[in-house]
Amino acid sequence: MAHDGGWIMSLFGSLTAAISGLTAQSRALGNISDNIANSQSTGYKRVDTNFQSYITASSQTDNRPGSVIARPAYTNTVQGTIEASDNQLALAIGGQGFFNVALSKGTLNGKPTFDDREFYTRAGDFSRDENGYLKNSEGYYLKGWTVDGTGNPDRT
C-alpha cells in the first residue's frame, strides 16, 4: 500500500498507537490524582511522570507501530514545607536527606525486632512507643547507632 512513495500505517497500527497514548495519559492522571489526595500527608513526596516513546521500524513486509508509556519518577529530593509542631520528638530535614527507618517484624523477649530492609522517609513525626523506640505515624522506627558511655556513636 504505497502512498506518495511511502508506506501508510494500517488501521490496527493507528489504533494501537492511540491506545498506548491514552493508557500513558491515564497513568499520568493517576499520579496527579495521588499527588492531590496526599498533598497534606506528612512526608509525602509527589510522583512525577516521564513519558517514553517507543519507535519501531517498518519495512515493506512488516509494520510495527510505535507506542508511548508513562514511567513514574519516585525519587524526589525537593524539600517540603517545614511546619512548627507541639511534638518535642518531631524532626525535620532542611535540604536533601532522609531518615533511615525500619519496620518491626515482631518481638523477641518483649523487645521489637526489625526488618533488615532499608527504608527512607522524610516523615519525621516521631513519638515513643511502649519500649521507648522512636516511631513515626506510618509505623516506621527510626534507626540509629548505639552510643558508648561518652556519647560517641559505635559504628561497628
Image (cartoon, rainbow, N blue to C red):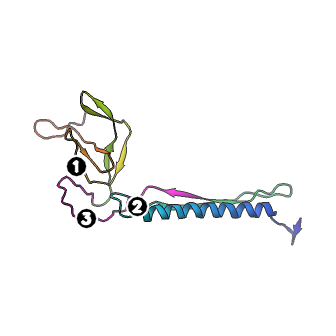
- Please identify the quarter of the rendering in which residue 58 is found: bottom right
Find the magenta span and give its range.
Answer: 69-93
> What is the residue that sits farthest to the top in this orientation?
109
Q: Main secondary structure of the magenta part?
A: loop
Q: Quadrant of residue 17?
A: bottom right
Judge whether residue 82 is colored magenta.
yes
Task: Please provide percent x and percent y for residue 107.
Answer: 29, 31
Q: Amino acid at mark 2?
A: Asn
Residue for point 18% across, 60% down: 86
Query: Mark 3 is on which residue type?
Result: Glu
Q: What number is the disc on residue 127?
A: 1
Q: CA distance from mark 1 to mark 2?
A: 22 Å
At 52% from the left edge and 61% from the top edge, which residue is drawn? 30
As drawn, which residue projects farthest toward the right? 1
Magenta region includes residue 126: no
Left or right for 11, reference 88: right
Image coordinates for residue 156, horizontal then vertical, percent:
25, 33
Q: Earlier in the sequence, mark 1 or mark 3?
A: 3
Horizontal side of residue 31 vs 12, given as left or right: left
Q: Is residue 76 left or right of residue 141?
A: right
In the picture as drawn, the residue positioned furthest to the left comes out as 150
Q: Which residue is mark 3?
A: 83
**Quadrant into which the N terminus falls:** bottom right
Which circle, 3 or 2, is nearer the viewer? 2
Q: SS of the residue at dot 3?
A: loop
Residue 43, percent across and down?
34, 57
**Where 123 falls versus 11 (above or below)?**
above
Give me the C-alpha separation between circle 3 and circle 2.
17 Å
**Residue identified by numbered label 2:** 38
